[in-house]
Amino acid sequence: MRVLISGAGIAGPALAFWLRRYGFDATLIERAPRFRDSGYMIDVWGLGYDLLERMGLLDAARDRGYAFERLAFVDERGRRVSGFDADVFRRAFRGRYFSIPRGDLARVVFDAVEGDVETLYSTSIEAIRQEDSDVEVQLNDGRTRRFDLVVGADGLRSRVRECVFGPIERFEKYLGYWAASFVASGYPHRDEGSYLSFARPGRQISRYALRGDRSAFLFVFVQDAPLELDPHDAAAQKRVLRERFAEDGWECPEILERLDGADDLYFDAVSQIRAPAWSSGRVALVGDAAYCPSLLAGAGAAFAMLGAYVLAGELARAASDPVSAFPAYERRLRPFIERQQENAARFASSFTPRTALGLSFRNTVLNLMRIGPLGAWYARRAFANEFDLPTYP
């Protein structure tokens, strides 16, 4: 059974991992010229932790991860105004919690399949034509190849979804924010073990120290209408960030200076994908391509791995009739995903409040989380992503 997977982020390699285990022949294609190991910091707990454990990749991920000691918001002079110790989350999730750059997590998953599945870089899909017994795929290099199944794991701006289901405008729910991140070397302010943020109404900037004398930065800002920017125009994206944060205090001027040398800038809208169906015939979607919960959900990587696990399992269970596995995968997963998407949409205004009053309220809540039992209870209530993982043969 030949399966083409478009996208070598997290969902695609995770799907290839499980499909290989079940005896499928998977091919990964990636439009980027090389493996992309950049990305902002994410937290791993609950489902993400459980799935890495099932894949046998937990130790490798933890080795690349970080155990932050505290989260703090600071004022213009760098004085703490709110925050709490990260032990709150470790207590809430019984120690099954750590942080890791998204690109490092993707690398851990990809390393588990590299060399065992065909992987083609600088390759994307131009057209898809479904037939009764297989799928014909036209690639950007002019080749035509045939597969039994095609899966789009190619993110928010999925080419597979566009070819089969239509343009992104039909499915994107814009949440009113934009986000950007980059990594720089030699930044003088380290604060090892701390995740520091500085906020003004409608925008915030965060930094955290990485190994190898590197520091990562994350920008989030309110934008009522989507920006009309070329996604490949890094100069225009940097110009927007300078305009939004130029007048802010704390370390913002220093961070914006480092932005000049950033050659791997992530810059995108904070959006969700609400697709009425995740499959059509022999083509299916997984991860952000099917149900992007948004950066603010905090568990997009976990949901990508979850979708890969369930989709592969249902395909293995229905090997004699693989097309029937797609609706089964969606029935099992969609109710959970839709609840998580609703929670993420509600959380957006708390992540980056638009008003001074909103910032004050958030600071009060964060300070209350310093109260041990209360903080652990709130963390479980706000961030628990419990799902009864099925066991597949």
Image: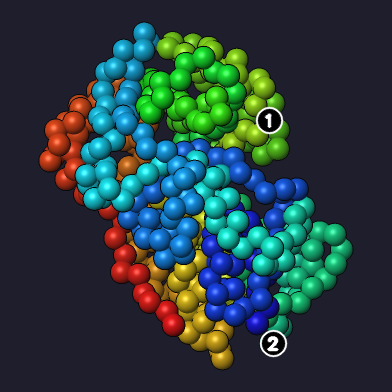
According to the picture, the residue beneath numbered tag 1 turns out to be 263
Residue 243 is at least partly visible in this image: no
Number of marks drawn: 2
Query: Which quarter of the figure has residue 359?
Result: top left
In the image, what residue occupies the spot 32% across and 25% down? 72
Query: Which quarter of the figure has residue 379?
Result: top left
Extreme residue toward the right, this view: 142
SS class of the residue under badge 1? loop
Residue 335 is at least partly visible in this image: yes
Say if 121 sits above or below 54 in the image: above
168 left or right of 94 in image: right
In the image, what residue occupies the spot 66% across and 76% down? 25
Q: Position of residue 303 (x, y in %)?
A: 43, 58
Mark earlier in primary sequence (1, 2): 2
306 left or right of 380 in image: right
According to the picture, the residue beneath numbered tag 2 turns out to be 133
Q: Position of residue 137 (x, y in %)?
A: 76, 70
Query: Is the residue marked by circle 2 packed among few (<14), some (14-19), or many (20+) residues within 10 Å?
Result: few
